[in-house]
Structure formats: structure tokens, C-alpha cells
Image: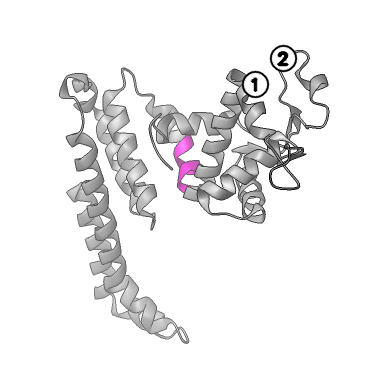
């Protein structure tokens, strides 16, 4: 870990000592002086702060662990050392504390795993570096919806077809939602303080990263439900991909809040 800090400091010092390079940077109109400060001092301080944040998160995660459940053979292996360096290197690239916290969580979960697949993790890491916390939140919520539609269909149908009355005090008649997708989007908007346009935008960017696909499908699994509720559309407008499920396996614990 200290080796990472030393390399960053060395790179900053090499730039600071290079008079010609600093001169060229300072010749850039408007932002030359600012860039010089960033390369000399600010980036080094920013990186150190993020590194310290990562260490703090790791400390908190491991303080809550049951030592008996830790895979001691793995944490003493070269793979764990490689994983630690990768998590540090990636965490200092992020300006979001929640993202840095997830890197610490990856390290904690890995220490508890019976067999950690470092090769697969290396394959999904570049995608995780690109995905935003907002995208993760929406996709994780959609993944939970998909699970519930498969395993708790009637409950989800009752929730999604909640009705309201035109006039207060009269029997309910007008459905609040006309489809599962409408209910999902509304729930996501309320949970993450987003607009419907935000949700669509985040799903668009997620699809570009291979984590979501716009593919309409009928979520109904039980005979008779659809015909009994013809006014309700049992459709979803898209689904998470296998790539997201693999990514989630490493970056989001079952009790993790995004």
C-alpha cells in the first residue's frame, strides 16, 4: 500500500523537477498555471486523501468480521496481494466515497470467500471502474425486482396494481400503475430522488456498458393471472445482463445499500 503512495509521490516529484515540461504546461492559455499546480501538488494530495479513505473503509469492514470465518490461506496468498493493489489503484481513481467504500467491501468479501476467482474479477474490474453509483443503484434495484417477479409474483402484482379513488371516500377504481415497468420506475425515482428521464438516461448509459438490455418481456408466470387482470400490463421494458450479475457478485453484498 505504501508502495502505491511512493510511486504517486515519485511521479509528482519527477514532474516538479522537470523545468522544460513545467514550462510547456504553463504556456497553455488560461489553465496552464492551474494544471501546473495540479501536477505538482493537488493531484498528489487528492490521491493520498482517497487512499486514506479506502484504508479507513477497509479498517471499518474488517473490524466487524468474525475472525474465525476469514480464509487465512487466501489472505496470505499472492492473489490477495494482487487483489489489494488492484482495489487501491482503482479506488484512487474515484472521487465518490460510496465507490471507494465498495472497493473496501470487495476486499472484505474476498477474505471470507472459500475460493475467490481473481481472473474473473480482473475481467469485470474495468467495467466497474466505468459504472457510476447511480447506475449501480438503478440496476441493483431492477435485479431485485426481477427476482421478486420470478419468486413473489402475486405479491408484486398486488403492489403494482394498487388502485385509488377518483373521489375521496369512494371505492378504489383507477389504477396508480398500468404496468410493472411503470411501478418499477416510480419506485426507483422515489428511492434515489430521480426523474423518469434520469432513469431512462441511466439505463441508456448502462446498456452501452453491457449491463442492461432494452428487451420487453411478459413477467407473468402463473396461468389465469393475466386474463383476470386484463387492464394491467404485465410487462417489463428491459432487464439486467449476465455481465451485471457477475459484477454484482463481487461489488455488492447481499446486505449492501447502494
Task: Identify the secondary structure beneath mark 2.
Answer: loop
**Vertical relation: 19 (above or below) 50:** below
Q: Indicate left or right for 127 with 53 as reference.
A: right
Query: Considering the image in quadrants, where does the C terminus appear?
Result: top left
Instruction: Identify the residue position indicated by label 2 in the image.
Output: 222
**Vertical relation: 87 (above or below) 21:** above
* Percent of width and height locating residue 105: 32, 37
Residue at image point 41% right, 31% down: 250
Circle nearer the N terminus (1, 2): 1
> In this orientation, which residue lies closer to the viewer: 231 or 240?
231
Determine the main secondary structure of the stretch shown in magenta: helix
Residue 256 seen: yes
Q: Indicate left or right for 216 with 93 as reference.
A: right
Residue furthest out toward the front = 169
Q: Which colour scheme is used?
A: one colour
Disc 1 + disc 2, Cβ < 8 Å = yes
Instruction: Identify the residue position indicated by label 1 in the image.
Output: 154
Separation of disc 1 and disc 2 at Cα? 9 Å
* Percent of width and height locating residue 43: 31, 66
* Percent of width and height locating residue 30: 46, 86
Q: Indicate left or right for 5 with 257 as reference.
A: left
Amino acid at each position: 500500500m505504501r508502495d502505491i503512495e511512493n510511486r504517486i509521490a515519485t511521479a509528482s516529484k519527477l514532474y516538479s523537477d522537470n523545468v522544460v515540461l513545467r514550462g510547456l504546461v504553463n504556456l497553455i492559455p488560461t489553465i496552464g498555471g492551474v494544471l501546473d499546480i495540479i501536477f505538482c501538488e493537488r493531484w498528489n494530495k487528492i490521491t493520498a486523501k482517497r487512499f486514506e479513505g479506502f484504508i479507513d473503509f477497509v479498517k471499518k469492514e474488517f473490524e466487524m468480521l468474525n475472525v474465525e470465518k476469514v480464509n487465512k490461506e487466501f489472505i496470505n496468498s499472492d492473489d490477495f496481494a494482487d487483489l489489494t493493489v488492484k482495489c487501491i489503484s482503482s479506488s484512487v481513481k474515484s472521487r465518490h466515497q460510496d465507490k471507494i467504500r465498495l472497493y473496501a467491501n470487495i476486499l472484505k468479501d474476498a477474505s471470507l470467500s472459500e475460493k475467490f476467482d481473481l481472473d474473473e474479477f480482473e475481467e469485470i474490474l474495468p467495467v466497474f471502474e466505468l459504472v457510476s453509483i447511480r447506475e449501480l443503484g438503478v440496476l441493483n434495484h431492477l435485479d431485485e425486482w426481477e427476482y421478486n417477479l420470478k419468486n413473489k409474483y402475486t405479491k408484486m402484482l398486488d403492489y403494482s396494481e394498487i388502485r385509488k379513488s377518483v373521489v375521496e371516500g369512494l371505492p378504489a377504481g383507477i389504477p396508480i400503475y398500468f404496468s410493472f415497468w411503470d411501478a418499477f420506475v416510480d419506485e426507483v425515482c422515489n428511492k434515489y430522488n430521480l426523474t423518469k428521464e434520469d432513469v431512462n438516461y441511466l439505463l441508456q448509459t448502462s446498456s452501452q456498458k453491457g449491463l442492461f438490455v432494452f428487451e420487453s418481456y411478459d413477467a407473468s408466470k402463473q396461468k389465469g393471472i393475466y386474463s383476470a387482470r386484463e387492464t394491467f400490463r404485465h410487462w417489463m421494458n428491459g432487464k439486467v445482463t449476465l455481465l451485471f450479475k457477475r459484477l454484482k457478485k463481487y461489488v455488492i453484498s447481499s446486505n449492501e445499500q447502494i
